[in-house]
Amino acid sequence: MQSVQKTRRAPLKARPREVTDAEFEQAVRDFSDRYKKTLEYLAR
């Protein structure tokens, strides 16, 4: 899923397929989780 990096709503809503809030929340959670792990790794 390369679209995880685009966490802003506009590009997601612009797609023909309707993106549900649940899917959006899940994508944001996945992205922020990965981001947090990266920050922790860099902060070592």
Image: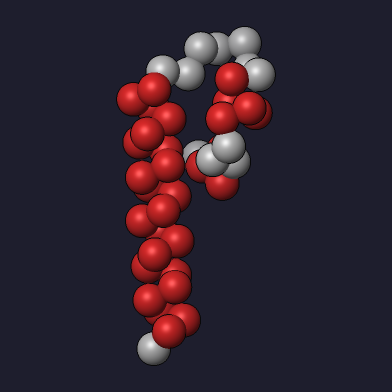
Residue extending farthest to the bottom is: 44
In this rendering, the count of numbered labels is: 0
The x and y percentages for residue 23 are 38, 27
The residue positioned 51% from the left and 12% from the top of the image is 18
Can see residue 2? no
In the image, residue 31 sits, relative to residue 38, either above or below, namely above
The x and y percentages for residue 5 are 56, 46
Can see residue 3? yes
The residue positioned 43% from the left and 30% from the top of the image is 24
In the image, residue 35 sits, relative to residue 14, either above or below, namely below
Q: Indicate the quadrant containing the C terminus: top left, top right, bottom left or bottom right.
A: bottom left
Query: In the visual, does 28 lie left or right of 10?
Result: left
| Snapshot colouring | secondary structure
The residue positioned 36% from the left and 45% from the top of the image is 29
In the image, residue 40 sits, relative to residue 28, either above or below, namely below
The x and y percentages for residue 30 are 38, 47
In the image, residue 7 sits, relative to residue 20, either above or below, namely below
Quadrant of the rendered image containing residue 15: top right
The x and y percentages for residue 16 are 62, 11
The residue positioned 37% from the left and 67% from the top of the image is 37
